[in-house]
Image: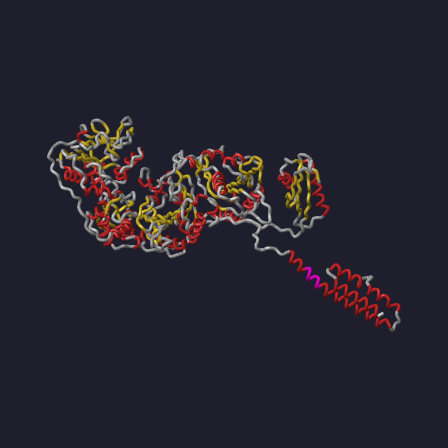
Amino acid sequence: MKFSAAWLETWVKPVASTDEIKDKLTALGLEVEPSEANIFDIAVPPNRGDCLSVWGIARELACAYQTAIQEVQVSNLNATSEKSIEVKLSAPTHCSRYCGQLILGIDPSKQTPKWMRERLESAGLSAISVPVDVTNYVMLELGQPLHAFDADRLSGNIEVRLATSKEKIQLLDETELELNPDDLIITDQSGPIALGGVMGGLESSVTENTRNVFLEAAHFDPVLIRATAKRYHRQTDASYRFERFVDPELCKIAIKRAANLLIEISGGQVAGATLAEELAAIPKDKKIKLRHNKIENLLGFKPSAKEIEQHLSGLGMQLETKADAWYVTPPSYRSDLNIEADLIEEVARLVGYQAIPTRLPDSINVDFKIPEDQTPIDDYKNFLIDRGYFEAITYSFISTELAQQFMPNVQLCKLQNPISDEMNVMRPSLWPGLVQAVTYNLRRQQSRIKLFEQGLSFSQAGSTLQQKQLAGAWAGTRLVEQWGEKAQTVDFFDLKAEIEGLCGLNATTLGIEFKAAKHPALHPGQTAEILKNGEHLGFIGCLHPQLQKSFDLTEQVMLFELDLNLLQKTTVPSFEFISKFPAIRRDLAVLIDKHIPAQQLLDYLSEQAGEFLQHQFVFDHYQGDKLPEGKKSVALGLVLQTNERTLEEVEVNEVINSLVEKLKHKFNAELR
Amino acid sequence: MEEQVANIAQQANEAVAQSEDLKQLDAIRIKYLGKKGELTVLLKQLGNLTPEQRPQFGQLVNQAKQNLQAQLNVKKSALEQLELEAGLQAETIDVTLPGRGEQTGKLHPVSRAANRAKAIFQHLGFIVSEGPEIEDEYHNFEALNIPKHHPARAMQDTFYLTDGQVLRTHTSPVQIRYMNSHTPPIRVIAPGRVYRCDSDLTHTPMFHQIEGFMVDENIEFAHLKGVLQFFVSQFFEIDVNMRFRPSYFPFTEPSAEVDIECVRCHGKGCRICSGTGWLEVLGCGMVHPNVLENCKIDSEKYTGFAFGMGIDRLAMLRYQIPDLRLNFDNDVRFLRQF
């Protein structure tokens, strides 16, 4: 809401400087935005439709400064003609009051006077023609949108009703609309002449030749106006005000004011006035109970009864004082005051929020839990940070194309109104965003990138799934550029070490399995599915070379993504016995077929070795020319121990020999 | 006899003096003092002497032996010392070369600010709760007293999914979810990503908010002021002037917007605060009775306050980040600064 200080002064004599008044308005909840010195630019909140006018703002100031406010300048005009246009309200719940005023014989050559032009311009409107300017002026001045019809272009009487879906209207902006049964229209005998409360029609609009004017000032239902304005994307100054509620009493005053001004400027005679109303549909006066103690309860301090009464009546409220409470009737222009809390806010803002004390509440909250079988997310973040990862935050929405490239088999959550095509679905994985971030950095002279992100991935599977993920990307060398080490490109096992680290954080890696797998976004020969106690934990692998190419990357990118909820699951630690007796280490080097996964050997050993085998691992691995075709050499370390005694050579040999036999039998393994 | 001993002793001494390493020295020891050493052999010849001559001779040889041993020891120490020093020299390195290892990564500045805010509220007894990012309209609007066709919906341009759900436009839905499953006293903060259909110099379609709310008997607006004043002072580590301005949110009544004195110019006016001296940091108010009732909480018995602030904004103010969009570029040259 914009207007000049000069205009405001015609309503309320300034009792302070313009800057002080601006601060005062801000302190009242009508935030003044920066503008030229003598212009007020006020951000009126949506619940204060009554402040979308100079008069409304003046009322607030008069109350805050407890000073006098000008009255609305209307004088009764004597009708010199009986001619009038009848109005029928056929949708009274949507339009419950319609004021019409016929004015005959204006002089179309008259120009809008300078003072009005200036004020319109200060509000951001340009002068068009006297009748239109008068309607705009009164709307800005009092807050009631009006419309002027060329009375000669109307036929018959007016009906305010809902449209039918076959009806059309050509609006002032020269576009044609196909109407909807939820639209409220003003019609005459010929059909729709205006989209009620939103915009007038072209056919009946005022031109430079108009001599006879029919003015309209009506009360429209906010909900319907908003729905209509939104439906046709036509937000006008009129619809803006109606959707924020205009005082139903205002149209009666505003139409007189507009008639006065029009005649003053363009001459003419007042003819018949029309008032159609459905009193039952007009909002009634409310009586709100405001309890003395509730004010203190809610705010934390208690203004005096006198102060409270002064402020409320200053705002135009009627007060009935009873023993424990006031019964307050707000003025008809305050639709935002409905409950006790609304009145308490009025008191608070007039007294000033700075007058409310500042203190801390004093209870202790014991309603919390710190489960120890859940590793905090920050632990994982810190782990990755220690390992050189930077935390990235990428957008939750990506392009459909990218989503399908990475996760073609997932049903996506699509946006109806995305901000762009590049962001029109919710990401089914954190990888696309991370790979984009990696690409961004590689293009800016970074040669080694380690990024991680924690966030949700989205998909549809019956219902919407929003899963917490921890994902990471690593491109470039294994180590930061070193003087003492030759540079090596990061590989699967570098990343696997970090995953093993993450899985082992505050937990045990027993139960963690890496299985060869396929994932559409990853290199088919370098992908593992990670399982935690048989449940799917996530994937790790190398970005598929085709995808790498589509990002125009020369570096390969190692990726991982883990289900954070599952990762966080752990157990509260519990002591395990430490043996007093020494362990015995035995090594076996076996020659086996290339395709046998090392884990399979280890699992088999674990199964078959009996109670003495505590630990088994691979410490060497060789595939090369020196070996027979199709074979590889795997060196296994076995650690045997018991809690009861030192194992004897004989026992150990027995176990080892038996294992060697079993390996030969099961895997066709040859001892080297 | 004496001559013989003296000669051997002299030879031995010269050899010791000229020896250059421990190996040589040991060879000398063996040559003169070993099983077949020259001095040892001499002692064996005592038998060829008369009983009167033996003690004198024996003493002479033993003396020579002891002298030589002493010399050997001294020389050995000296040689060992030299060897040690040579070794130390050879093992000297250039300590100014960089360490062999990893760089340290960093937390994203938004996470950093969020953690800082969380820690402050946790110290006040607030617990952390989270909610989904795809919400239904009920939790994002209606339950928060924002009915359909309400002009307040225009205050937040909403992303809609094709199935009618929305991307949450604020973290306030977590209030509803929490209050639907807990009874007062309630003291909760809820950080997270939020989404609005807005993209320009100062707005990104996705950003971060932290919601806080407290519901109990006798919670006052004064407490809201107290908690927020405490938070702001702690977060920025200075006594910041704050002002509360009446405002409008459908889910609070009274509502307020809170400005803090510009942390850069301390209220004098600068580019950061557009010359006003104030920075808008959060919206807050007393929880609207309708919201409490929607969660089956008796609004006669209980009152509450709620507040919401932008974490990106807090991070930008705290860490002097000039442009919001930097938070989403994920440029490592930016990320490593925090």
User: Is any part of residue B139 visible from this angle?
Assistant: no
From the top left corner, tell me how far across and down residue A214 is, in percent.
18, 33
Q: Is residue A39 left or right of residue B171?
A: left
Q: Is residue B243 left or right of residue B51?
A: left
Q: Quadrant of the C terminus of chain A?
A: top right
Q: Nearer the viewer, residue B181 or B92?
A: B92
Q: Is residue A116 magenta?
A: no
User: Is any part of residue A586 visible from this angle?
Assistant: yes
Residue range (magenta): B77-83
- Name the magenta segment's main secondary structure: helix
From the top left corner, tell me how far across and down residue B138 is, in percent.
37, 39
The residue sitting at 60% across, 49% down in the picture is: A484
Outermost residue on the bottom side: it is: B52
Residue B54: which quarter of the image?
A: bottom right
Q: Quadrant of the N terminus of chain A?
A: top left
From the top left corner, tell me how far across and down residue A659 is, in percent.
69, 40
From the top left corner, tell me how far across and down residue A429 is, in percent.
48, 38
- Vertical order, A487 against A364 (above or below): above
Residue B46: which quarter of the image?
A: bottom right
